[in-house]
Image: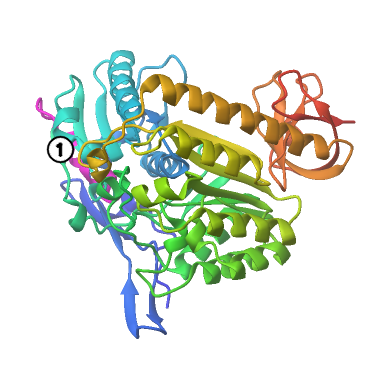
């Protein structure tokens, strides 16, 4: 059974005091066959004098992961439906929304810089800060001059309600609302593209892994997810809007199903059957949750692309144990081999952390040698950052910043070699490319099924290519070797 409210304007529900209540049902009531219970997701938004938002302008700034970008786009869409316009470059906004990240100490610093910059660029604006940094350091954020409202991970799902209250009844003292990790229960649905061509569908939130170096479980809460049926409905809506590609996002996507008793492989199969969506990409999958069944299905699926992003973090079993990761390097190598057996041209990106506590020079060399021998395409390299409250701080061996920099550079050079070799193998081949919108006169870019970036010079670019799947012949590298040229 699926409940919906359609064809009714919220404006019709206003009472004499200009207060009204309406309910958006973003999911459905259904019987879960495994656990024999009914789950109902109903989201209420109480609008207080929505006329206060008419003609207002909002500016958005997002830091961090694709999940954050997806959520920000959804917030923007919701505000747009209330009459709020997106501020253009150079315009002063009435509302500022900053969606923050806290994966590293550098990320925290960037968040503070972004908040100060938004306050400075939009004097007098109502400033809302949410996201992981807001969850972990709400009081500190609330004390930043110009900030009006700070919302943690649980409250993010009711951002519009909090904004409605705060914007109309503005206070000189910033308010912050957060819950403890164990009390973060809400799930804020999101399927948006913002100003992008690809849509980002949030399928899961939170994490139960508690790796020793990571604060994400504290910032996002425990693993939770909506139903398969509700996600299929969002994919169908994307198809009706003309979307052709969806990226599945989340914190620990492979853990999908803990809330509903469903499986990630079943979500993949259900989404694969949605007419109109030509491509799906899975943003990231933990290696221990990447099953052979999933790999084999994606290899023969209609719309799931030969493109994987898999976090390794370290190629040393000693370090993996210190991190409390759920696999060893042999399992990781087996997963890469399995992918390449059934999808020889698959693009495989790998997350690697350098300089974490306990990573001796010998451990790093193990990682380097391991990655050198793996048939992967690109390395996402980032230095370890000490996070307050994490158990990694009890590990005695500390790597200097200078050594972190050297190790990062070596792995980045290795990554460039692997990516270059992967691209080079495809020169001269034909490939289907989904092109993305570009600024008029600028080079246009798109991606093949296996995530090779393709460039069209500004002189040959056309708005008609945007969001179109076009078969092209892949030429040589562009000037900075970040893409292959389209041979016309």
Relative to 413, is 150 above or below? below
The C terminus sits in image quarter? top right
Determine if residue 246 is in view: yes
Verify whether residue 171 appears in magenta.
yes
Residue sitting at 19 percent across and 57 percent down? 182
Q: How many marks?
A: 1
Q: Between 344 and 147, which is closer to the camera in this rendering?
A: 344
Residue sitting at 89 percent across and 37 percent down? 428
Q: Between 47 and 439, which is closer to the camera in this rendering?
A: 439
Residue 468, position in %: x, y?
74, 43
The N terminus sits in image quarter? bottom left
Where residue 141 sits, quadrant-wise, is top left
Residue sitting at 69 percent across and 36 percent down? 418
Determine if residue 304 is in view: no
Q: Secondary structure at mark 1?
A: strand
Residue 198, position in %: x, y?
59, 44
Relative to 333, is 97 above or below? above
Give the residue pinned by disc 1: 176
Verify whether residue 410 appears in magenta.
no
Residue 236, position in %: x, y?
57, 61
Magenta highlight range:
157-174
Left or right, 248 with reference to 323: right
Q: Between 259 and 190, which is closer to the camera in this rendering?
A: 259
């Amino acid at each position: 059974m699926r409940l919906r409210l359609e064809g009714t304007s919220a404006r019709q529900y206003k009472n004499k005091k200009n207060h009204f209540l309406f309910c958006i049902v973003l999911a459905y009531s259904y019987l879960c066959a495994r656990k024999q219970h009914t789950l109902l997701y109903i989201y209420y938004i109480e609008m207080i004098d929505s006329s206060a938002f008419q003609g207002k302008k909002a500016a958005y700034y997002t830091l961090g992961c694709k999940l954050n970008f997806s959520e920000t786009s959804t917030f923007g869409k919701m505000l747009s439906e209330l009459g709020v316009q997106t501020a253009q470059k150079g315009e002063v906004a009435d509302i500022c929304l900053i969606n923050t990240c806290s994966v590293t100490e550098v990320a925290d610093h960037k968040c503070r810089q972004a908040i100060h910059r938004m306050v400075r660029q939009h004097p007098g604006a109502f400033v809302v800060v949410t996201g992981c940094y807001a969850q972990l350091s709400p009081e500190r954020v609330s004390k930043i001059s110009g900030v009006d409202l700070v919302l943690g991970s649980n409250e993010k799902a009711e951002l519009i309600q909090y904004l409605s209250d705060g914007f109309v009844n503005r206070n000189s003292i910033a308010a912050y609302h957060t819950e403890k990790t164990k009390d973060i229960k809400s799930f804020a649905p999101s399927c948006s593209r913002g100003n992008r061509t690809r849509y980002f569908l949030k399928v899961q939130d939170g994490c139960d892994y508690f790796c020793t170096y990571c604060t994400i479980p504290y910032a996002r809460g425990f693993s939770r997810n909506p139903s398969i049926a509700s996600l299929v409905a969002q994919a169908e809506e994307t198809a009706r809007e003309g979307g052709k590609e969806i990226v599945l996002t989340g914190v620990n996507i492979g853990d999908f199903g803990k809330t509903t008793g469903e499986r990630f492989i079943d979500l993949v199969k259900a989404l694969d059957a949605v007419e109109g969506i030509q491509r799906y990409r899975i943003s990231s999958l933990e290696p221990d949750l990447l099953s052979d069944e999933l790999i084999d299905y994606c290899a023969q699926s209609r719309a799931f692309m030969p493109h994987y992003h898999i976090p390794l973090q370290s190629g040393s079993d000693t370090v993996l144990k210190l991190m409390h990761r759920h696999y060893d390097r042999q399992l990781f190598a087996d997963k890469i081999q399995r992918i390449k057996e059934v999808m020889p041209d698959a693009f495989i990106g790998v997350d690697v952390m350098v300089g974490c506590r306990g990573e001796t020079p010998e451990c790093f060399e193990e990682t380097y040698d391991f990655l050198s021998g793996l048939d992967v395409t690109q390395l996402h390299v980032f230095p370890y950052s000490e996070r307050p409250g994490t158990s990694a701080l009890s590990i005695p061996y500390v790597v200097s910043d200078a050594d972190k920099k050297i190790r990062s550079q070596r792995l980045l050079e290795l990554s460039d070699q692997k990516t270059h070799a992967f691209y080079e193998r495809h020169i001269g081949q034909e490939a289907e490319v989904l092109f993305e919108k570009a600024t008029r006169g600028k080079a246009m870019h798109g991606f093949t099924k296996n995530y090779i970036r393709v460039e069209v010079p500004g002189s040959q670019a056309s708005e008609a290519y945007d969001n179109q799947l076009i078969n092209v012949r892949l030429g040589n590298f562009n000037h900075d070797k970040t893409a292959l040229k389209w041979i016309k």
